[in-house]
Amino acid sequence: MQAKPDVIVIGSGVGGGAVARRLAENGVEVLILERGDWVPRESDNWSVASVFHQKKYTAHDSWLDADGVAFRPSIYYNVGGCTKFYGGSMIRFRERDFGELVHEEGTSPAWPISYADIEPYYGQAEAIFGVHGDDAGDPSAPWRSTPYPFEKLQSEPRVARMAETMRRLGARTSALPLAVDYRESGTCIRCKTCDGFPCKLGAKNEAETSLLRPAIATGRVSIRTNTYAKRLLLAPDGKRIEGVEVEQDGKTETLRAKLIVVACGAINTAALLLRSANDKAPDGIANRSGLVGRNYMSHNQTALMGLSMEQNNTVFQKTIALNEYYFGDADYAFPMGHAQMLGKLQGGMLSANVPYLPKAVGSTMARHSMDWIAFSEDLPDPDNRVTLRDGQIQLSVRRNNLRSHRRLVGKVESLLRNCGYPIVLTKPLLKHSTSHQCGTAKFGHDPRDSVLDPYCRSHEHENLYVVDASFMPSSAAVNPALTIAAQALRATDHMLAQDLGISSVKEFRA
Ligand SMILES: Cc1cc2nc3c(=O)[nH]c(=O)nc-3n(C[C@H](O)[C@H](O)[C@H](O)COP(=O)(O)OP(=O)(O)OC[C@H]3O[C@@H](n4cnc5c(N)ncnc54)[C@H](O)[C@@H]3O)c2cc1C
Ligand code: SF4
């Protein structure tokens, strides 16, 4: 353990992990603070009962909703954060997502950076996460200066057949960019327990395998697990963070470093900043704008199951994406969003989420289903926010922009029917949805209207950065992890040059 690291990173997810690896590979000493522990590799990793029914790996936390009703959030406190359980979809936001985008129910704001600013970092993030992909058939795909590191994962016959039928119906599908180790020498076996499960083989390219382990291997990164960052402490001049108060095994201590990087996930980051309020920052750290915790977004999401009499023997189902309606369609001029296949649903996963569903019925349905998920953009609303009530997180959300989401779901439903799945079941995933959390400390040029500058540095505190999805001024409509990683790399290059005096930065190597 370093006596005094150059940088303290709070949170070991994709944002914190990307910063730690980049810094360490450029000679910087880093201490990572992580409230959770390592996820053991064990048989429970791939057990539906352990993961979905007993929720063995889900955080034991209790938050309040807008009405003050307590719920257990579907969130993960462990080394690697949520990516240990993610589906591995590593997809770029579209070029137009960085500009102002007019929706039926409002406008999503422009980012302070353009797609061109972040594009090189998308390429580096894809290299480090070993992404397999191919944009052929994706009408909304942004331009790229580097090819995908690995060729797309081929679809199994049933999925390929559905993609071909959709294409004939006028809806092009494309390969879903995926971060699994399916290289020639790779260890991924394309199993059925990937999406939502940790990988027992370590073959999922996530924050632990692709960022933290290589970072620690440099010898410059230590990680303190089961260490909870309680508060950031302000220096007397109010300009710098002079320490982090942490709690481990019931003991409280203060740790110090030149730079403090917060990456606790958009909700916990807002909570940490708010919790750190003091007489110099009565509304919380970095919160002179009053925007910390506001503009919470998490996508409008609906799962769809297309059912047919024919059995679906697909094992690794999550191979295709549908972006045909991302920015609209001939009959609807507004963005609708994105759909992608889910990992193959299993009976136990259905009965875990629908308690009254008999297990046998769930298993039969799952054997006959094709499973999708549709994402649409939700719009930033200052009243959708994270606050603290007696120290407990309260998440108050009123869903918006649902009309375009319903249209997208209707389009996917109709495609599935026309592909030979006459019954389509849909389940909106809108309540307490936190998997794609973002927006709670947005970046921008104007300190009156943003928390962070365009490199994710606090406008108010010169040695404080925030590098998780909090920075996003809009949510776009595809999965966030690749964009979090790319912006974290971009922010780190800025830190290296501006704060640590290292200007010839070594880029990530896969
Ligand atoms: C089931 C699931 C599937 C998903 N699938 C995909 C997908 O296929 N593609 C995709 O792009 N995205 C996916 N996502 C979303 C993606 O995983 C997240 O956007 C991303 O992991 C967020 O990374 P992060 O670093 O911002 O935060 P997190 O992953 O939440 O990491 C934050 C870390 O900080 C730690 N922490 C929090 N508070 C403190 C504190 N006070 N002190 C110390 N440590 C703290 C937490 O324990 C955690 O490890 C999925 C999410 C879930 C839950
Ligand atoms: S599909 Fe591959 S990466 Fe995913 S859990 Fe299975 S072996 Fe691991």
Image (cartoon, helix red, strand yellow):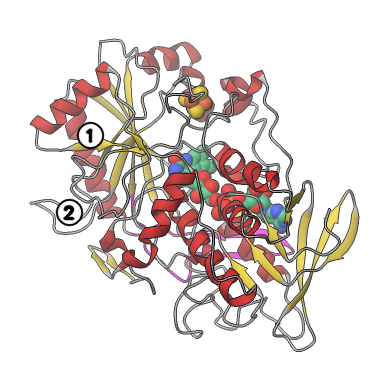
242 sits left or right of 397 in the view: right
Task: Give the residues drawn in magenta, as a range.
Answer: 376-400
**Can residue 421 be seen by looking at this rendering?**
no
Provide residue 390's location: percent of width, then percent of height.
74, 64
Tell me the amino acid under the disc marked 2. Answer: Gly
**Can residue 481 be seen by looking at this rendering?**
yes
Mark 2 or mark 1: name the one nearer the start of the chain: 2
Q: Secondary structure at mark 1?
A: helix
Tell me the amino acid under the disc marked 1. Answer: Glu
Are circles 2 and 1 on residues that touch, CB within 8 Å? no
Q: Residue furthest right?
A: 251
State yes or no: residue 26 in magenta.
no
Closer to us: 419 or 69: 419
Which residue is pictured at 41% across the width and 44% down the height?
Answer: 90
Disc 2 CB within 8 Å of nearest ligand 1 atom = no
- Residue under label 1, please give it: 413
Numbered badge on residue 328: 2
Disc 1 CB within 8 Å of nearest ligand 1 atom = no
